[in-house]
Image (cartoon, helix red, strand yellow):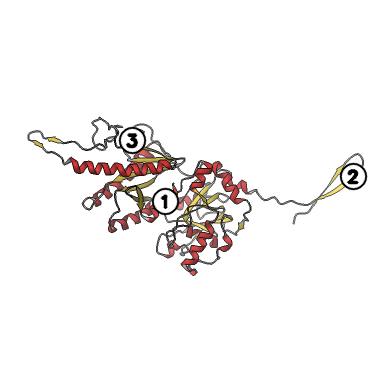
């Protein structure tokens, strides 16, 4: 127990004795948002479990990130659109803030994804303080395994009340953080502070007991978001970035061969007749340019639709020597590879595009001018067949998303469309 301190305040006329009661000062909520601040991203329905259990989890393979988090670190709760409940409206922004208190591991299934046979999340981060923007009183503190789907949907909507959407961030703050990845630093938190403080005002703290602040590892330390390191000029990453041109623009006249890193821009104009000459026997043929030009025009059309959509949302859109499209806004980067597909070429085109996304991420980002890994999008000219749609749906867990252009409308796999919509 803290005892009152007795002090004497003396003036020339009379001595007065005052008892000063101890004062407990709680840190102002706005102090939560002093940099650095980070974010956890996950399905809105998974945050229902976090409300009940008081922890967030990282998947297998992310032990290093788990060990890099320290007690006292502050995380925004980013609830993405649902996947494991029959709803598409809840989530899509920041639903709360938490202060890390301790760490533990688990082997039981607690999140819907785990219960439905998806990935496991064994590395737990417990929060000693949680601030929920929504109606947390409407969330029953029992496991989701004991709830009907309708209740989980209702509770996901309750946590989404007063959500800070990406549209509001961009409109009112001129900035939004990168929504991708299980966790990352919110690099310009000062721009979002007024919006977040407005939501914290009047919110009661949800205090929880937590396990030890030590990890089951000797590598505990301050969480620092890693950034790919450039290897300097030259090499594969030396291609310069250029504003993405329209299909009517003039291509490069350079003679670089496929795969060259000479810095010349790819020519997107229709193919000309081609003559192939051998050392001894001259072989000539005329390519059917009509079909090729149609495919090139369709390729340009789907890129133009994506470029216009992203440009209207404040992205700067470029192409490089390698990439079809790179879009940048604040600390968000998007890498897109467009492909014209039909029944005869779907397999080859999709395989080729996936390889290109991996290669161009390496060349333009990890060896190039960008600091962060991009959101990767495969943009198709039409919906893939069911067999490939199932494969591409699985590929979303690896951070590769698939959309397609239907006339002037961008459609796609449900999770991919949700991720794309969060950017707009």
Residue sitting farthest toward the front: 407
Q: Position of residue 256 (x, y in %)?
A: 24, 32
N-terminal-most mark, 1 or 3: 3
Alpha-carbon span between mark 2 and mark 1: 70 Å
Q: Secondary structure at mark 3?
A: loop
Per the rendering, the mark at residue 419 is 1
Q: Position of residue 330 (x, y in %)?
A: 47, 40
Which residue appears at 25% of the width and 30% of the height?
254
Nearer the observer: mark 3 or 2; the answer is 3
Query: From where the camera sits, is residue 186 visible?
Result: no
Q: Quadrant of the N terminus?
A: bottom right
Q: Which residue is mark 2?
A: 15
Q: Secondary structure at mark 2?
A: strand
Q: Nearer the viewer, residue 272 or 345?
A: 272
Quarter of the rendering containing residue 162 = bottom right
Alpha-carbon span between mark 3 and mark 2: 83 Å
User: Few, some or many C-alpha atoms within 10 Å of disc 3 (few <14, some 14-19, many ≥20)?
Assistant: some
Q: Give the answer, above or below, for where 214 lies relative to 256.
A: below
Viewed as shown, does residue 15 lie left or right of 347? right
Q: Which residue is mark 3?
A: 245
User: Few, some or many C-alpha atoms within 10 Å of disc 1 (few <14, some 14-19, many ≥20)?
Assistant: some
Q: Nearer the viewer, residue 378 or 171?
A: 171
Nearer the observer: mark 2 or 1; the answer is 1
Q: Give the answer, above or below, for where 187 lies relative to 134.
A: above
Viewed as shown, does residue 166 lie left or right of 385? right
N-terminal-most mark, 3 or 2: 2
Q: Secondary structure at mark 1?
A: helix
Viewed as shown, does residue 371 lie left or right of 157? left
Query: From where the camera sits, is residue 65 visible?
Result: yes
Which residue appears at 37% of the width and 41% of the height?
307
């Amino acid at each position: 127990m803290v005892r009152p301190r007795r002090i004497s305040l003396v003036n020339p006329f009379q001595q007065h004795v005052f008892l000063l009661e101890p004062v407990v000062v709680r840190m102002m909520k706005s102090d939560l948002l002093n940099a650095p601040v980070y974010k956890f991203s996950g399905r809105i329905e998974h945050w229902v479990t976090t409300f009940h259990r008081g922890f967030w989890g990282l998947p297998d393979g992310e032990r290093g990130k788990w060990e890099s988090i320290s007690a006292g670190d502050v995380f925004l709760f980013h609830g993405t659109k649902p996947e494991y409940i029959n709803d598409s409206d809840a989530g899509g922004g920041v639903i709360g803030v938490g202060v890390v208190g301790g760490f533990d591991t688990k082997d039981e299934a607690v999140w819907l994804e785990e219960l439905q046979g998806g990935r496991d999340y064994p590395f737990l981060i417990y929060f000693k303080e949680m601030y929920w923007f929504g109606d947390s009183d409407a969330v029953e503190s029992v496991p989701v395994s004991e709830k009907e789907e309708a209740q989980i949907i209702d509770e996901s909507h309750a946590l989404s009340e007063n959500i800070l959407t990406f549209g509001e961030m961009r409109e009112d703050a001129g900035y939004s953080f990168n929504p991708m990845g299980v966790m990352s630093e919110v690099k310009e938190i000062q721009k979002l502070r007024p919006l977040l403080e407005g939501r914290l005002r009047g919110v009661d703290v949800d205090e929880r007991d937590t396990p030890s602040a030590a990890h089951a590892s000797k590598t505990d330390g301050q969480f620092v978001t890693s950034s790919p390191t450039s290897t300097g000029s030259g090499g594969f990453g030396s291609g310069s970035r250029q504003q993405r041109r329209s299909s009517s623009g003039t291509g490069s006249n350079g003679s670089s061969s496929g795969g060259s890193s000479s810095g010349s821009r790819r020519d997107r104009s229709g193919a000309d007749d081609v003559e192939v000459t051998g050392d001894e026997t001259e072989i000539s043929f005329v390519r059917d340019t009509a079909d090729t030009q149609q495919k090139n025009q369709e390729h340009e059309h789907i890129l133009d639709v994506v470029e216009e959509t992203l440009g209207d949302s404040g992205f700067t859109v470029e192409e490089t020597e390698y990439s079809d499209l790179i879009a940048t806004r604040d600390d968000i980067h998007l890498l897109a590879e467009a492909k014209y597909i039909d029944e005869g070429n779907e397999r080859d085109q999709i395989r080729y595009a996936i390889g290109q996304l991996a290669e161009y991420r390496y060349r333009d980002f990890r060896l190039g001018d960008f600091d962060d890994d991009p959101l990767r999008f495969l943009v198709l000219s039409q919906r893939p067949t069911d067999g490939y749609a199932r494969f591409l749906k699985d590929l979303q867990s690896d951070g590769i998303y698939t959309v397609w252009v239907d006339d002037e409308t961008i459609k796609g796999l449900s999770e991919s469309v949700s991720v794309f919509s969060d950017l707009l």
